Amino acid sequence: MNEREVIETLKMIQEEKLDIRTITMGISLRDCADESAKKSCGRIRDKIRRVAGRLAAVGDEIEESYGVPIINRRIAVTPISLVAESSRTDDYLPFALALEDAARDADVNFIGGFSALVHKGMTGGDRKLIDSIPRALAGTDRVCASVNVATTRAGINMDAVSLMGKTIREIAEATKDRGSVGCARLVVFANAPEDNPFMAGAFHGVGEAEAVINVGISGPGVIKSALEKIRGSDLETVAETIKRTSFKITRVGQLVAREAARRLGVPFGIVDVSLAPTPAVGDSVAFILEEMGLESCGAPGSTAALMLLNDAVKKGGLMASSFVGGLSGAFIPVSEDLGMIEAASRGSLSIEKLEAMTAVCSVGLDMIAIPGDTTADTIAAIIADEAAIGVANNKTTAVRVIPVVGRKAGDVVEFGGLLGRAPVIPVSRFASSDFIGRGGRIPAPLQSYRN
């Protein structure tokens, strides 16, 4: 980085809320499997403590050395359904508790990987893990879960989709004394990436190295500030400005990622070039869309504006690093984005409009509070719709909805911290039970046949 770039970066950090959202260490637990669940859990604790013991400290050192805020230190592990399947037990809760203990000892805020991959079918281990998710999330604070129910290659496993609708309802009931917040630590995916550093959907894929460092960047405030300087320009100029700004943000992310990998003695994996908003003022993807000329996020034109933003962010990131991965693009989590919260509160942003926007952004229906009496079948149908968008478009999509027990449309629920607050958004009152009840698998689309 030359002197001018250093000055620009300092301004982005000090005035425009640029940060490294997370340093996430991926750790393989494949060698921790054992017939004895107790022995396997012991190996999991020992390995995470050994490999990630310095992760938090290294994050602090880099933050102090370079002046770049690093908001979160996290760990992602091999999907526990694969590790625990060798154990002679029907209860996977001890594995979640082992992860919780290890995360606490490593001083990380989240650990992801209480996960299963069931896009084409479920093994006994997969089913045991899914059955354990409600108690696992109710009994821990740092463990995150994810289930992949669809891929473009395999289609959509509707039996798994139905089961996840019931699981989300169970989590909501199990954590109702805390605003059903346990649901915020579960993501249901289509086309889940193996190198995602962002929670709650992070896990360490079977094709990954023994341990790896992935970094997720942020920077909605930086993008918005750049667009404020070119008000009145055409959309080609807007796209070019976003692309150039994304390049600068990604270079900072790659610098931090490589330095963290060097100090920890593990390979550098990827930089996830994502605009991950927070509830803080000025750190909003919705405000970027409004800066482009929309009266309110969710107004007609929002999907087109989001497509422009997402594409330009990816292009800039790819020019800055040869190892861009994860989700990469723009996130639209309602409760974690002040502009999205305001748009939903004023009525310009509905769950249907959010679904349309997910066709062109990084993930999907994210951190959306819905009425507490929403049925399991309706939740499953929402998951199926989102999975269909991912499967048909060969992209990652996901659902992280929170049926807040005891709350109705129009209420506001406070989750606190990075999870923010959310207006409860209404869902359709028309039933999908007969459709969900059919079960089976929606076949892969024609575009999946590429060999």
Image (cartoon, rainbow, N blue to C red):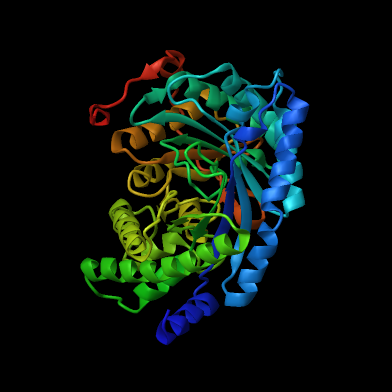
Q: Quadrant of residue 48?
A: top right
- In the picture provided, is 358 more to the left or to the right than 400? left
User: Which residue is more in the foreground, 166 or 351?
Assistant: 166
Give how far across and how far down residue 39 sits, in percent.
76, 29
Q: Quadrant of residue 441?
A: top left
Q: Quadrant of the C terminus?
A: top left
The answer to whether residue 333 of the structure is visible from this angle is: yes
Give how far across and how far down residue 67 sits, in percent.
59, 76
How many numbered markers are drawn? 0
- In the picture provided, is 288 more to the left or to the right than 414? left
Task: Note whether 186 is above or below 153 in the view shown.
Answer: below
The answer to whether residue 279 of the structure is visible from this angle is: no
Residue at the spot 50% in from the left edge and 36% down from the top edge: 206
Task: Note whether 260 is above or below 115 in the view shown.
Answer: below
- In the picture provided, is 357 more to the left or to the right than 36? left
User: Which residue is more in the foreground, 295 or 301?
Assistant: 301
Q: Quadrant of the N terminus?
A: bottom left
User: Which residue is more in the foreground, 89 or 220?
Assistant: 89
Give how far across and how far down residue 386 sits, in percent.
40, 35
Q: Quadrant of residue 30?
A: top right
Residue at the spot 24% in from the left edge and 71% down from the top edge: 237
Residue at the spot 34% in from the left edge and 57% down from the top edge: 314
Give how far across and how far down residue 216 sits, in percent.
50, 57
Residue at the spot 45% in from the left edge and 22% down from the top edge: 431
